[in-house]
Amino acid sequence: MLVNDDIDALSRAVSGPVALPDSPAFAEETFAFNVATVHRPDVVLGAADAQDVAAAVKWAAERRLPVSVQSTGHGAESAIDGGLLINTRRLQDLQIDPGERTARVGAGVKWRTVLEASVPHGLLGLHGSSTDVGVVGYTLGGGLPVLGRAHGFAADHVRSMEIVTADGALRRIDADAEAELFALMRGGKGNLGIVTALEFSLFPFSDFYGGGIIYPGADAATVLAAFRRWLPTLPEDASPSVSLLRLPDMDFVPEPLRNQFVVHLRFAFLGNREAGDALLAPMRAVSTPLMDTAGPMSYLDVDQIHMDPADPLPFMDGGALLKDFGEETVADLLELTGEGSDCPLLLVEVRPLGGALARTAAMPDALPDAVSGRDAAFLLFLVGFNIPPLAEAVSASIGGILAAMAPHSTGYTLVNFHGAPGDEADRARAWSPAVYERMRSAKSTYDPGNLLRFGHAITGAPAAG
């Protein structure tokens, strides 16, 4: 149990604010984007810099107090209960090097901030469906980009990072300095340390074409069948996805679509209007769209492709990696989620993988990392509201859909799309068995006391002998 002397010692060791549960700042520092997740640490630090993070971890290690970390509050699948929470949102350092095509970001920087600095130079970073997400947490989970088929996972292109390990040491790691730790942090989430800064590659672009087509939900079977036939005709510079949406009557939904069941085709393409229109023509001929927003766009408007909610909401989710999206897979999915089903989920999404997502690790100059999913063909992702009285039905629906799709699944997940982590066997599904055992070994080396035990955490391998 923490006493006043402990809190005073932490306050003296850091320059950022320290807050206890009865402090007015506590709620702000612990707030998660998923408002169904309410963190209750014993104490929270608003870290001002990397030195604050190192000092706080050392302070916690001396007291055998578990440590967790949060920046933007995205990805909060499970509540933090007890220990020290370090909030890194104040670490806002951002450096763009147009000549080297790199970015260096502090742990609090969001993708939107990176793009606002890089796009004027004709460069983009490998962000996901929402640029409101923090760069570091997203990338440590592998990072499935909007343009992933063209460039691979975000973690594939990390050049170096600065990390505080469980002993309170601040380290700079890359492919040469502590190479195994560097490899396992890229895709291993936060199991081996707290990242305070990240350096990664940016990619040149010129024309960009993106947006979406929304169809009536009654035509879901027709649209998904067409999508399945259309996908193999696309170049890797084109990254589509498709989702079944049961849209609520809420402000984040365009008014004409509220209280409707629809199919949303998303499309991102590194090309001009003529090429983009030609690629999309087969899908524009399917059904009668309710809305078509696809066309040339400024890359700074990229959030309009997926139209993810911009405001915090209470939700739960789950995901699986699929071996295929063939006729039988589509039929099994629609039986539980299509027109006429009682599916309560907000979103049932299928994202094609392949392309550079599968190939990057096999390239001659590729660096090893811990990213899973390279052998999968698709990601299935499910999201529903975590609010009474829906919560029980949403939880049952996610479990039922994942069970029904198990014959079509690889048996593994992507850690950022896994959903709330279960027992150790469930958590292990975010990595291949070989990578998981390497991570357990490294956990025993870098965090033998299991200080970093929150979130999608694993335990170390038992000592030999």
Image (cartoon, rainbow, N blue to C red):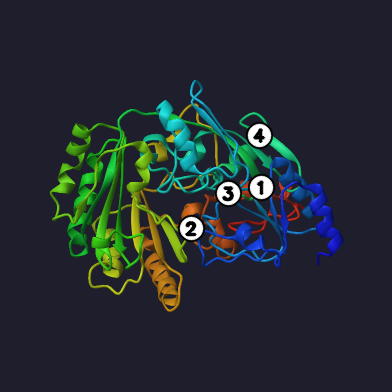
Residue carrying label 4: 173
Q: Earlier in the sequence, mark 1 or mark 4?
A: 4
Q: Amino acid at mark 3?
A: Lys
Quarter of image, res 353: top left
Tell me which residue sits at (27%, 55%) in the image: 264
Q: Are marks 3 and 4 in contact (CB under 8 Å)?
A: no
Q: Which class describes the residues within 10 Å of circle 2: few (<14), some (14-19), or many (20+)?
A: many
Q: Amino acid at mark 1?
A: Leu
Q: Are marks 4 and 2 in contact (CB under 8 Å)?
A: no
Element type where label 3 sits in the image? loop
Quarter of image, res 401: bottom left
Q: Amino acid at mark 4?
A: Ile
CA distance separating discs 3 and 4: 15 Å
Residue carrying label 1: 192
Tell me which residue sits at (62%, 60%) in the image: 30
Residue 106 position in % (x across, y down): 60, 39
